Image: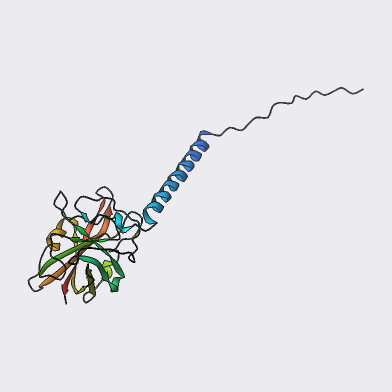
Amino acid sequence: MGTKKHYRHGRKRTPRLSWGTFIILAIGIGLMAYGGMFYWDRHNRTNSPQPLANIPQEVNHVITEPDETPIDTRQEYSVPSDQPRSITIGSAQIHGFVQRVATEPNGAIAVPSNIHLAGWYVDSQRPGESGLSIIDGHVSGRYADAIFKDLHATANGDRITVEFGDLRTVEFEIVDKHYSPADQAAAILTKKRAEIDAQLNLITCSGTYDAEEKTFDERLIVVARKI
């Protein structure tokens, strides 16, 4: 007779995750969650055209994160008959409604509440009147390009059309462009040229974005005259 061999049947071990693997998984899950929140925030900010009824008639406070929801320019948009309603620069494919902007508590000119709007500075002349008129606009938002994203593409001789509340239009011709450090732009923006009767100055951001200051380090100013 042969002898019986006895075998010990041990329990199978469950493999354990190393700390390194655990950390990598945790980081991956965190990145996925952050990406999901980023996408959701971007979707909410840049989709579903904003009803014009929700747009403030005038902005007189600091806006650090303007709304980015699209604005359908086919909507009915009413402003007083003697105030600018829309601005168009065909050469740069710029077209959008105009919102009134006043002076911020810090003394600066306010900016539009939505990146797809331009802002007419109410303490300047109405566009086309004798004197200096100022219209500002964003170059970009956090997620999307803004109304003046291609203002840099304009050239001397290009035409600007401003439509008023009564649907009449005034035409301007670009005569100059300036790039200026942000802290020196106000002096250029508010300068009225003696040789131009009805002057229109446009301004937007340019240069490098400063995340700490939440603004760009340069400004682009376009000078135009009524024709």
* Residue at (41% x, 53% y) in the render: 43
Above or below, comparing residue 24 to residue 158 in the picture: above
Res 204 → quadrant? bottom left
Q: Colour mode?
A: rainbow
x and y percentages locating residue 58 in the rendered image: 21, 55
Is the N terminus in the top left, top right, bottom left or bottom right quadrant?
top right
Tag count in the figure?
0
Residue 220 shows up from this direction: no
On screen, residue 37 above or below 19: below
Pick the quarter of the image with the C terminus: bottom left
Q: Can residue 53 be seen in this view?
A: yes
Q: Which residue lies furthest to the left in this view?
A: 194
Residue 24, image x, y percentages: 49, 40
Residue nearest the observer in this picture, 107 or 56:
56
Above or below for 35 versus 86: above
- Left or right of 2, for residue 159: left
Residue 203 coordinates in the image, percent (x, y): 21, 63
- Relative depth, front residue between 39 and 5: 39
Residue 110 sits above or below residue 195 on the image: above
Q: Judge left or right: residue 51 versus residue 22.
A: left
Question: In which image quadrant can residue 2 be found?
Answer: top right
Q: Quadrant of residue 8?
A: top right
